[in-house]
Image: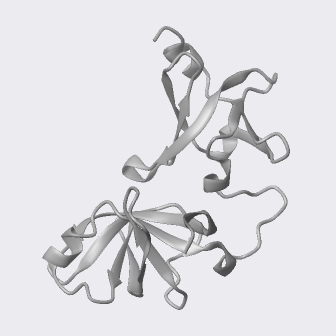
Amino acid sequence: MPRGALIHLGTLLRPHGVKGEIRMDWHADSSLPLDVPLWLAREQSPPRPVKALSCRGHRGRLLARFEGVTDRSAAEALCGHELLIDRDFLPALAGDESYVQDLLGADVRLPDGRRLGRLDRLECPAGQDIWIISTDDGGEILFPARSCFILGFDAARHAVYVDPPQGLTEVYAGR
């Protein structure tokens, strides 16, 4: 399966208990689909199919069980893998929505049109989505990806428009 047709749903973090459950950083608005093909991939390795058996919430995270993962050791072997789904199995997006994966590499622009940098990746420490924006001078900006700071997307220009929290750009200006 080509990697471009797959959307990153979440990242497997660490085992929970001894029966094969694993915690996930979850990047989707809905729960883990149990009835569609899913894929696991790590770094540059090719994706491999996986079947989700169960999913439940626990302390602000999702816990999942996968076919063939029956103990803590097997769950540990999955740590760091991305959980992917074929784009065709996802619901249609509204006109003002976009998958973050489609925005990677996009220009990040301020309300006045000035370029802040390039959207390089998404991280999710402690359940908060953070966009990593690479600046033209080789630095990085950790941007809180909250709807109140994201103004919109321009697919034709491959650009994201943001209004950073007060003081954020100044914190990174001197680096």
* Residue drawn at x 62%, y 33% as measured from the top left: 118
* Residue drawn at x 41%, y 87% as measured from the top left: 51
* Rendered location of residue 65, percent (x, y): 32, 83
* Rendered location of residue 3, percent (x, y): 55, 65
Residue 166, above or below 142: above
Residue 99, above or below 137: below
Q: How many badges with numbers are in the image? A: 0
Which quadrant does the N terminus fall into?
A: bottom right
* Residue drawn at x 56%, y 22% as measured from the top left: 168
* Rendered location of residue 151, percent (x, y): 76, 40
Which quadrant does the C terminus fall into?
A: top left
Residue 64 image-quadrant placement: bottom left
Judge by depth and name the residue closer to the eye, 29 or 100. 100
**Lateral position of residue 158 relative to residue 126, left or right:** right
* Rendered location of residue 67, percent (x, y): 32, 89
Would residue 40 be seen by someone viewing this image from the given angle?
yes
Would residue 60 be seen by someone viewing this image from the given angle?
no
What scheme was used to colour the molecule? one colour
Question: Outermost residue toward the top?
Answer: 174
Residue 163, above or below 39: above
**Lateral position of residue 17 relative to residue 61, left or right:** left
